Amino acid sequence: MSDTRGPERPVILVTCGDPAGIGPEVVVKAWAATPAHAAARLRVVVDPATLAAAVAGCRGLPPLPHVVVTAGDRRDSRPDELLVVEPDAAAAQDGGDASPLATRGRAAATAVLSAARFVQSGHADAIVTGPLHKEALHAAGYTVPGHTELLARACGLPDDAASMMLWLPANAGGPGGLGVVHVTLHEPLRAALARLTTGGIIAAGHRLASLLEAMLGRRPRIAVAALNPHGGEGGLFGDEEARLVAPAVARLRDAAVDATGPLPADTLFLRAAHGEFDGVVALYHDQGHIPIKLLGMHRAVNVTLGLPLVRTSVAHGTALDIAGTGTADPASMLAAIDAAVRLVASGRVTAATPATI
């Protein structure tokens, strides 16, 4: 990553997610190892006491001193000193119960909402988030499935205005990175399939193409997955390909998106992994998540599309079973920080202007 030190270097805010999970560990490890300090000013949005408690019993962490700064402080960050911005008390939400689980969820959500406020007020340029624990979030009174919807509401948008892209950076010597955007996300499979529409596929395709163009610096090659086995076998296994997916692909191509499909999902991701496509439109959560996590779970990054701000995240969960052991891999956090810096440098936020549908 090139050194762009100077007055215009962006401020990137990092949150730890659930304090009982591996989020604090991967944040501290990534802070000490990322080259992004040369391209951005990094800060961690967290209550200092919560961070200290979370890392106190964790083995193998670099001994970084914590320095509390204000949201508007423009000083440089460096790998041997952790800059901490305390959450905005006004971002905290009343509700939920007083259990330790709810306390964790409240701390995690308040940090994320504070980071969004700091970006909206001009104090920062992007957010990188650690993993939330959804049960803790609900215990704290937040009626959202996760980060995507939480941030959409913080931006004054409906839940379905934002969507998720998983970004898998390229391996050394391998083909370029791979992006996967989902038409439907955190809901029961039956409900997701009932909500699947041509318009939703078109919107997801435009969001993916816009984001990948910013990431890659060129027009991306997009594939749209089929829903049914073997792409429906000409209607023998279902008509969604002809009725919903193919019209969406045609509309995307009419709008100058380099789109192909519908393609059977069981071979599509192998073709994409070999470099034939830059991005895939997946029709539901597991259709996109399973192959990306098999291809490189610890390198993958979650990017939120459709927001008026840049937000990236690790693509893994809280991993409560290994929290505190010092064995958590910071690769996804490192990749998420790098992706946020690249998106800010591209001059684009992750909100795409959808076609009329």
Image (spheres, rainbow, N blue to C red):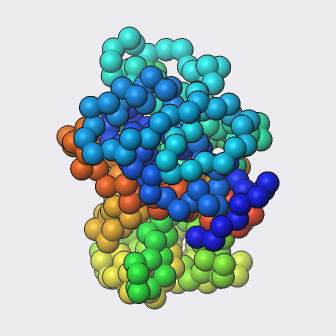
Question: Which residue sits at x=63%, y=24%?
Answer: 88
State whether residue 145 is above or below residue 185: above
Question: Which residue sits at x=30%, y=77%?
Answer: 266
Which residue extends farthest top?
98
- Quarter of the image containing the C terminus? bottom right
Question: Which residue sits at x=37%, y=46%?
Answer: 62
Question: Which residue sits at x=61%, y=37%?
Answer: 115
Residue 101 at what x, y percent from top left? 33, 22
Figure quadrant of residue 97: top left
Say if residue 303 shows up in the picture.
no
Residue 321 at what x, y percent from top left? 20, 40
Instruction: Using residue 317 as the reference point, say whether residue 180 is left or right of it.
Output: right
Residue 298 at what x, y percent from top left? 34, 61
Say if residue 277 shows up in the picture.
yes
Instruction: Using residue 33 as the reference point, say whether residue 53 is left or right of it.
Output: left
Residue 106 at what x, y percent from top left? 46, 23
State whether residue 32 is above or below residue 112: below
